[in-house]
Amino acid sequence: MDRLWPTVLTTVFIAKYRSFPSLWKNSDKIYLNRKKEAYHELVNLCKLRFPTITRDLVVKKIQSPRGSFWKELKKVQASKHSGASTDDIYTPSLWYYELLLFTADCETASNSSDKIATEFGEKMPR
């Protein structure tokens, strides 16, 4: 995440994000009607540090680390499939990689940012 976001806030933000499956468990239709309140909670959390933050910025704060996470996950998966020994499996460099592992089975990397952007009727930059 960005330099203004301390590690503690990022960790709390990801934990709060994890507590809202409606935002990351896109295949589960039961959660679709809960997205609005989930985003509202994340905005309120972030307003403690950034009083002027908006829902759009919160969405970007979700998309950014998830995009980085997916790049790292793809490297890990590619190293496992290459026939490499366990010593040669790629070790992710993101400090929050482990924190986002709960999203690994949810969807493909390209679908992640597309689904978030679709919710706002626009294509988010990658």
Image (tube, helix red, strand yellow):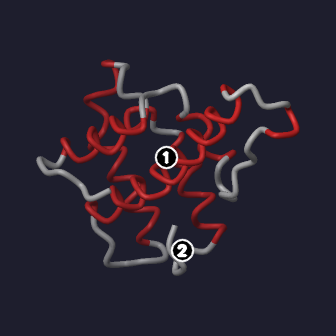
- Image vertical order of residue 69 relative to residue 51, above or below: above
Give the amino acid at mark 1.
Tyr
**Badge 2: how crowded within 10 Å, few (<14), some, or many (20+)?**
some
Q: Residue at x 70, y 29 (%)?
A: 80
What residue is shown at x 65% (from left), y 55% (from top)? Answer: 96
Give the x, y percent position of residue 109. Answer: 42, 38
Q: Position of residue 57 (x, y in %)?
A: 31, 65
Element type where label 1 sits in the image: helix
Numbered label attached to residue 5:
2
Q: Nearer the viewer, residue 85 or 126?
A: 85
- The answer for how far apart the CA atoms under marks 2 and 1 are is 15 Å
* Residue at 33% in and 72% down: 53
* Snapshot quadrant of residue 74: top right
Q: Residue furthest left?
A: 121
Q: Is residue 22 above or below residue 72?
A: above
Residue farthest along the front direction in this orientation: 83
Kindly identify the amino acid type of the residue bearing the numbered disc 2. Answer: Trp
- The residue tagged 1 is 17
Which residue is at the far right?
87
Q: Position of residue 35 (x, y in %)?
A: 30, 39
Which is more toward the observer, 103 or 55?
Answer: 103
Which image quadrant: the C terminus?
Answer: bottom left
